[in-house]
Amino acid sequence: MVAAALAEAITHPAAGAALDIEQVSHAFDIDGAELPVLSDVSISVEPGEFVALLGPSGCGKSTLLRLVAGLDRPKAGTLREDERRIRSPHPSRVVVFQDPTLFPWRSVWDNVALGLEAQGILKSQRHRVDDALDLVGLAAFRNAYPHQLSGGMAQRVALARALVNDPRILILDEPLGKLDSLTRITMQSEIVALWQRKGFTTLLVTHDAEEALVLANRVFVFSERPARVKADIRVDRPYPRHRGDPYLADLRRQILGLLGLDATW
Amino acid sequence: MSTYSLSDGLASGAPRLTRAPLLAGWLKESGAGVAASAIWIAFGLSCLWWEDVGDWSRTRSLGIAAFIIAAVALFGTVGADYLGSAGRGLRQRAPWLVALGAFLTLWEVATAKFAWLPLPFFPPPQAIIEVYTDDLPKLLDSVFASVRLQLGGYLIGAAVGFLTGVSIGWSRAVGYWVHPVLRFIGPLPATAWLPIAFFTFPSSWSASTFLIALATGFPVTVLTWSGVASVSNAYYDVARTLGAKSSFLVLKVAIPAALPHVFVGLFMGLGSSFAVLVVAEMIGVKAGLGWYLQWAQGWAAYANMYAALIVMSLLCSGAITLLFAIRDRLLVWQKGTVKW
């Protein structure tokens, strides 16, 4: 599957970018005291890979995503997108947050159009907004306002708002964390389908081992805060993956063991 | 078994019930209208039956007008089904017509007919009608003067307040300099500036515009500022990752997100600017409804005062209605907004 994604990346110049995280450490200043959140993290992601970052809640995974997005600068180390140093946000790296954070004063269509509008190319590229809405199956809701949408629909709009920019790296910060389990399963396969079709590099933060194994080619397991990479696990299974696959169940047991939860499983 | 007995009961009860609900339904729909008609006829009669204790020229016309309103209420509510939305509206407001007619009848009898209320201070309805017909030009001039002054001052105040609020909310440097000034000057009632404003400004009109702008500007500034300051960082993060520059963050994120707060400020500013308008007109400006009130008091023309008060109330209420309409249009995305 990686090969297929890579092949697509070659045919589409806009598809996935490589991501290099080199010896990144980060800390928060809380009331003068320094709270380390990331400690010497190095991850190298190939173009078009689907990478899951898995770890206990509050370990600093989301902080790492903010660094990749360029929203914050690391205290030490470097991050590169295709050899270019990441210093500020760029629409080639779009984040889908845990909350949809749609702008309540904008209709669904206008929310999706946000990126193109911010880059000043909306006038000539309006069809891309329609395409993105079609992609997530919400074309009929283009004139609705966010308060009229269900949680799953709102998260789909947030996904469309990211995809309309043709990102080279899609950053997913527990985007399905607040959805009910049925919507969650549906959206997991939608995300895989979109990734296969578009070929972007995907970085998914999750604390759900099963979700990581169903979606990703590679799973990085993080330690408690300050987060260090504990394991880099390759998930060599074709899509669509089956939740009951014994291979995945075995990996899951390993991962839960790494997280110190083997006794409960 | 129980369903049988239930339908039996309904079937046997049906013939007895046919007439009663029809009448009840008619009464419910048109009863208030008929009552309104009756009470307005009573009002008309109260105008014409007894002699006025004073000298008012519009008593007969008022009586006839009351009869016309009674006729409209009667035929309007009874025939509401043929009148579309106007008929429905009339039916809905018929209870208010009853209350209004009763109040007017009482007022008429208590003032013009038996003078239960002391007379120059409580003029009868026909005296107020007389003001509207005979003193119309002066009243209209006053309305125009007030609206012009209010509108100018309010628009300037709202614009300056909005821009100041956005600047303080957005820029730390602007906040550093403007915030203390705002805290020092803002809470001062704008009317306290009256004596100074009237001799420092070239004309009483510009002084009043300044004061109205001041009264409007403070709440608009504070609420715009707090609106901009309370915008969730998540919105900025989203916009920034999508490639937004800071002008976009201000114009397309901060301002629309703050708009509900801004409208609260605009409402508060409107209220306090009305107060300043009236005081300024009473003290300095020689035009407008405030001045008209003052002038009427000087001549002990109490009917004119009531007439001007009614007009003023309609204007203020109209201004608030207009602001609500603008808000509802701009903030359609909010759910469950207050209806005015």
Image (spheres, rainbow, N blue to C red):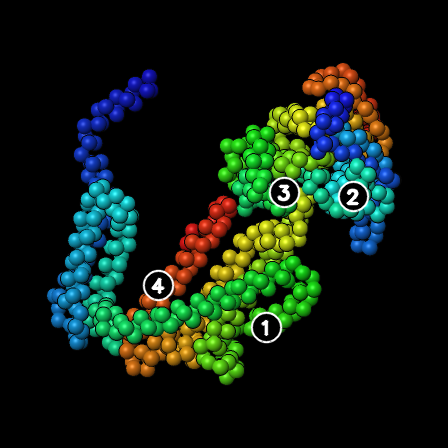
Mark 3: give few (<14), some (14-19) or many (20+) Cα within 10 Å: many
Residue type beneath disc 4: Leu
Mark 1: give few (<14), some (14-19) or many (20+) Cα within 10 Å: few
Chain at numbered mark 4: B
Point out the tag, 4 or 1, that comes first from the N-terminus.
1
Residue at horizontal 14 percent and vertical 67 percent from the top: B60
Q: Is mark 3 in CB contact (under 8 Å) with mark 1? A: no
- Distance between the alpha carbons at the discs numbered 3 and 1: 42 Å
**In this image, B313 relative to B54: left or right?**
right
Looking at the picture, do discs 1 and 2 lie on one chain? no
Residue type beneath disc 1: Ile
Residue B314 disc label: 4
Viewer-nearest of discs 4 and 3: 3
Residue B88, placed above or below residue B163 = above
Viewer-nearest of discs 1 and 2: 2
Q: Is mark 1 in CB contact (under 8 Å) with mark 2? A: no
Viewer-proximal residue among B112 and A160: A160
| Residue assigned mark 2 | A86
Residue B208, placed above or below residue B226 = below
Viewer-nearest of discs 4 and 2: 2
- Tag 2 secondary structure: loop
Residue B185 disc label: 1
**In this image, B268 relative to B41: left or right?**
right
Q: Is mark 4 in CB contact (under 8 Å) with mark 3? A: no
Residue type beneath disc 2: Ile
| Residue assigned mark 3 | A115
Residue A248 visible (yes or no): no
- Distance between the alpha carbons at the discs numbered 1 and 2: 46 Å
